[in-house]
Image: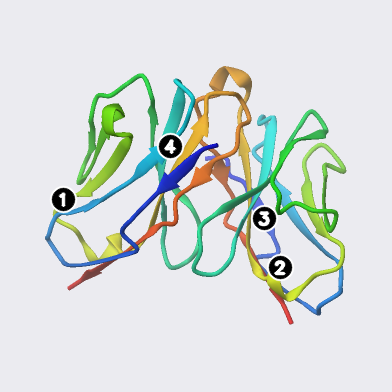
Amino acid sequence: EPEVTQTPSHQVTQMGQEVILRCVPISNHLYFYWYRQILGQKVEFLVSFYNNEISEKSEIFDDQFSVERPDGSNFTLKIRSTKLEDSAMYFCASTPTATHSSFGAFFGQGTRLTVV
Amino acid sequence: AQKVTQAQTEISVVEKEDVTLDCVYETRDTTYYLFWYKQPPSGELVFLIRRNSFDEQNEISGRYSWNFQKSTSSFNFTITASQVVDSAVYFCALRRETSGSRLTFGEGTQLTVNP
């Protein structure tokens, strides 16, 4: 069964450093997302990406964040200068075409980011 | 704006008890989708069910059942004869009909099933 794959599963970084979280969405999906979950809290939407551009972003997704689809398979989230409060689980997700718009998101297993 | 409320922060039951997780939502849309996800201690998000707003038929899948009531904006989830493996955080979520729309999650309910 196809799945969304995220790497690494856990990353520790020093405050102020740049991090890149990587995701390989399901191959025939067209919509890609990043969500964040601070420990013990709910899952929060960060950004959605379609047709090589951001389609929607939340107030959390400020100038420190950026997304990119550098090739035909990877989808990345970059945090330019990490802060302690960026420590969270980051989930990548994808959804299929418009004809399957009722589908919920298919989530990756998450990357736990710890900023020290 | 869309909002999902899961008023039950934590529920603890003994194995084989039935348990219902509540979910209330707010949306101005007439067409939308509702979801339940399970997050076990390992952390991943496991899709359980999707429900269209125009389909109020209740659904049963094994020990799981869902009660969707549009009149009260509720989408409750019942586990019958709970098992220890059901212990997890359960999230209710809402999204618009539009392709590529975000999921709006509730705060989650931590279910602990004790042997």
Tell me whether the residue at label 3 lies in contact with that at label 1, contact meaning CB atoms closer than 8 angstroms. no
Give the CA distance from mark 3 to mark 2: 18 Å
Q: Position of residue B36 (x, y in %)?
A: 39, 44
| Kind of residue sitting beneath label 4 | Glu
| Kind of residue sitting beneath label 2 | Asp
Asked if marks 4 and 3 fall on the same chain, the answer is no
Q: Residue at x 29, y 60 (%)?
A: B86
In the rendered structure, the answer to whether residue A48 lies left or right of residue A37 reads right
Tell me whether the residue at label 4 lies in contact with that at label 3, contact meaning CB atoms closer than 8 angstroms. no
| Kind of residue sitting beneath label 1 | Thr
Tell me whether the residue at label 2 lies in contact with that at label 1, contact meaning CB atoms closer than 8 angstroms. no
* Colouring method of the image: rainbow
Give the CA distance from mark 4 to mark 1: 27 Å
Residue named by callout 2: A86
Q: Position of residue B83 (x, y in %)?
A: 21, 61
Residue named by callout 1: B80
**Front position in the image: A12 or B1:** B1
Mark 4 or mark 1, which is nearer to you? 4
Question: Which element type, helix, strand or loop, lies under badge 2?
Answer: helix
Question: Which element type, helix, strand or loop, lies under badge 1?
Answer: loop
Mark 3 or mark 1, which is nearer to you? 1
Q: Residue at x 86, y 40 (%)?
A: A71
